[in-house]
Image (tube, rainbow, N blue to C red):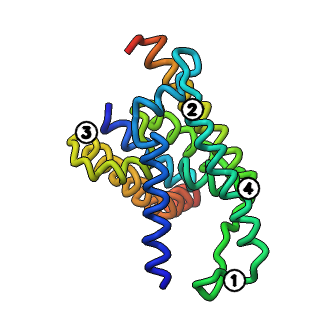
Amino acid sequence: MPMIASLLCGLIFGAGLLISGMVQPTKVLGFLDIFGAWDPSLAVVMAAALAVSVPGFMLANGRSRPLLTARSIWPTKRDIDLPLIVGAALFGIGWGLVGLCPGPALESLATLSPGIIAFVAAMAAGMALHDFWQKLQPKLRNQAAVANADG
Amino acid sequence: MIIAAGLLVGFGTRLGGGCTSGHGICGVARLSSRSIAATVIFMLTAIATVAVTRHVLGG
């Protein structure tokens, strides 16, 4: 049953991105181009999405557990830290360069266009690079500590 | 350009812990201060990027 629910949610999400035009990079760039020929229509999409998700999350928050799984898993972080700020800034630059964000990019793989395939491959590489860099960090910190101890 | 943008989107979403859907819709809908901050930041950098590529560089 959770599998069927996931499938249905994916279908609804994908249909929403497709119908609203979020999968069209030119439309997204038009929305971001507030100093040029601004196309504000995607703001309506975000507002409509929030109009559904706000009551949805309020409903979910009021329940002790989800309908189909044993327990709720909510995000626990509360602080606005440097990784959040830098990550969001980098993501925004990438989004503004080509008008693709992860959901619509994955959905657009269905077009088999070489540009989309290249973008998704680079996106996966960017994620892998981040995870590799995170794994490397404790090692680097330890090495720095050793170096300091010697000094 | 596509490759650079893909790398930035991949690295940025992992580091920042979310994207347009995760922070922009789900996080904002939960009134998470982290997500509201992330959404404001990525909207601003995306708008600035489009402004530079379209109007400064004239691409």
User: Which residue is disc 2 drawn over?
Assistant: A41
| Distance of label 3 from label 2 (alpha carbons) | 25 Å
- Label 2 or label 1, whichever lies nearer to me, is 2
Q: Amino acid at mark 2?
A: Ser
Q: Residue furthest bottom?
A: A70
User: Which residue is disc 4 drawn over?
Assistant: B32
Query: Mark 4 — on which chain does it sit?
Result: B
Q: Amino acid at mark 4?
A: Ser
User: Which residue is disc 3 drawn over?
Assistant: A115
Q: Residues within 10 Å of mark 4 (few under 14, many from 20)?
A: some
- The quarter holding residue A74 reads bottom right
| Distance of label 2 from label 1 (alpha carbons) | 36 Å
Residue at 40%, 34% (x, y): give it.
Answer: A25
- SS label for mark 3: helix
| Distance of label 1 from label 4 (alpha carbons) | 20 Å
Q: Amino acid at mark 3?
A: Gly
- Residue A36 appears in view: yes
Residues marked 4 and 3 touching at CB (< 8 Å): no
Residues marked 1 and 4 touching at CB (< 8 Å): no
